[in-house]
Image (cartoon, rainbow, N blue to C red):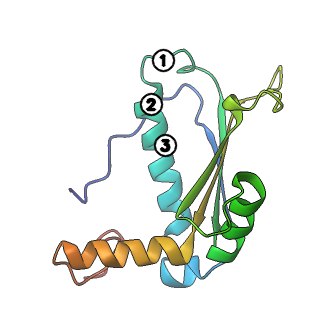
Amino acid sequence: MSDQAPPAPDFEQAPDIAVSIEAGPWLEIMPEAVDLCRDVALAALAMALDGGPHEHEPLEVSIALADDSLVRELNRTYRSQDKATNVLSFAALDDEDSPQPEDGPLLLGDVVIAFETTQAEAERGSRRNGSAGNRHSSRSGGS
């Protein structure tokens, strides 16, 4: 995988990507976490929407960086699974009880990422690939 940034998405209006730190040591371990989430979300939206029916609409998505405890609670409440998982997504377009505003952006939904689970997965992946360092280190200027 290349460390080069993807090409800038071509949006008429930049999507509103709200990234919040809800729990966990995200910024202590990865200071660029918020910017990285925005960059990845923009690239994913550009790929997913290219030529699609919502390509030229204003969009909004929320990303919450959390810990295993919060994700476990959400997973138990909304999916009846009493365990942590790496990522939970709540797609607003799939929820008939989630009304879309008439004159605002298209609400795509929420993504919640668990720190401890994703960190453990990244470490396992690094060991499998023979890499000793963090995958984000080259982006943050580390070695």
Density class for disc 2 (Cα within 10 Å; few <14, some 14-19, many ≥20) is few
Q: What residue is shown at x 58% (from left), y 36% (from top)?
A: 14
- Spatial distance from mark 1 to mark 3, Cα to Cα? 15 Å
Q: Are marks 2 and 1 in contact (CB under 8 Å)?
A: yes
* Left or right relative to 44: residue 38: right
Q: Residue at x 68, y 60 (%)?
A: 75
Secondary structure beneath disc 3? helix
In the rendered structure, which disc, 2 or 3, sits on the residue that comes first in sequence?
3
Viewer-proximal residue among 55 and 129 = 129
Q: Residue furthest left?
A: 130
Judge by depth and name the residue closer to the eye, 74 or 137. 74
The C terminus - image quarter? bottom left
Determine if residue 22 is in view: no
* Residue 52: assigned label: 1
Q: What residue is disc 2 on?
A: 48
**Of labels 1 and 3, the one closer to you:** 1
Q: Is residue 27 visible?
A: yes
Q: Is residue 14 above or below residue 141?
A: above
Q: Quadrant of the N terminus?
A: bottom left
Query: Where is residue 64 drawn, in percent x and y?
Result: 66, 60
Q: Residues within 10 Å of mark 1 (few under 14, many from 20)?
A: few
Which residue is label 3 attached to? Answer: 42
- Badge nearest the viewer, 2 or 3: 2
In the rendered image, residue 103, in percent from the top left (x then y), is placed at 82, 21
Identity of the amino acid at label 2? Ala
- The amino acid at mark 3 is Leu
Residue under the image location 29 percent in, 71 percent down: 125
Q: In x, y percent, where is residue 39?
A: 46, 51
When the figure is inspected, residue 42 is found, relative to residue 5, above or below; the finding is above
